[in-house]
Amino acid sequence: MLHNAVNENSSADEADILHQVTLVSEALEELGYIPESFPLGNDLRNDLGKIAASHPLFVFNLVESVFDKGELLHMAPALLNALKIPYTGVPAEGLYLTTNKVLAKRIMAMHGIPTPSFFAVSETDKLNKDKRYLLKPTCEDGSVGLDEDAVFTTGQKDMMTKIRQLPASHYFIEEFIEGREFNLSILGGSNRAHVLPPAEMIFHDYPADKPRMLGYKAKWDESSAEYRNTTRAFDTLSPDSPLYGEMERLATKCWDCFGLRGFARVDFRVDEKGNPFVIEINGNPCISPDSGFIAAAHAAGLTNRDVIGRIIAEIS
């Protein structure tokens, strides 16, 4: 099991990787394997050399950042591939394409996958004064940099000034879709992509003007009102409903278009007219015991052992 190294200074979202290692390790043991954990730190040659020297059957890739940069997470499978070591999950190419959110949105647009309008930080003159927008980091995952302070209108002059000063390589602007938020997890294996039950994020007791969105606080800050008042529900849509079917179709199309493998999650916003928009595609999403992916798997009647077994089955 290869994962990014953590220490006492690691943030909550970074330290969560150890919970994922535990879950995977326990499932691998149930499946008859002898798992061993290898952290990937700043000495890539040395760290990967240890893995190569152990001659593993395969590497279960849990790396979420390289050099503490989420935008470099594709380097781990790229290096494993160069060393001819089999590994689980999304290939390096798929991780690169989906980690760069602007590039991913351009590809989605090419394939007819609806995604919110987006703009460079230098294109604030193109924004509609009657809409709200979201300032997003281009390559960070885990909702890093996303909270209500990132939602803005063109009338917020200080925010507009700040945006124009940000590097275009690391930030962009996305239209904020007012409405509902869903996550659809996808599990590979058995020669098919299995879309797990959709989870809707429920925002309890939010003030009328507060953006209803799954931001960093709602995910990781247990002391925050956002964390306490945001829950996940799997029973808000009937499997026969048009919205359920359309999100399932779009999630599967994302899986195919981006060459995903193993496990992934597609995040949606649904506008007030019921139209779904893909806001992000997450390859190799978090699989800690309390993660959305594992919750969706359990809702589908799968055990942790089932999940890990299916992911391993797709190693090529």
Image (tube, grey):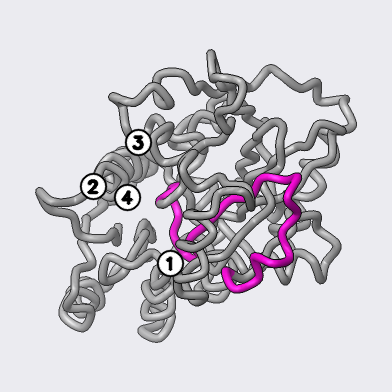
Front residue of this view, candidates 135 and 111: 135
In magenta, the rendered stretch is 121-144
Q: Residue at x 69, y 31 (%)?
A: 180
| Residue annotated with mark 1 | 87
Task: Please name the residue that numbered disc 2 is placed on.
Answer: 11
What amino acid type is highlighted by mark number 1? Tyr
As measured in the structure, the alpha-carbon distance from the residue carrying label 1 to the one carrying label 3 is 28 Å
The Cα–Cα distance between marks 1 and 4, rounded to whole angstroms, is 15 Å
Which mark lies nearer to you, 4 or 2? Answer: 2
Q: Quadrant of residue 233?
A: top right
Q: CA distance from mark 4 to mark 2?
A: 31 Å
Q: Which mark is residue 220?
A: 3
The residue that disc 4 covers is 33
Q: Where, by quadrant of the figure, is residue 27 drawn?
A: top left
Query: Between residues 180 and 252, which one lies in front from this camera angle?
Result: 180
Which of the two labelled residues, at mark 4 and mark 2, occupies the earlier sequence position?
2
Q: Mark 1 or mark 4: which comes first in sequence?
A: 4
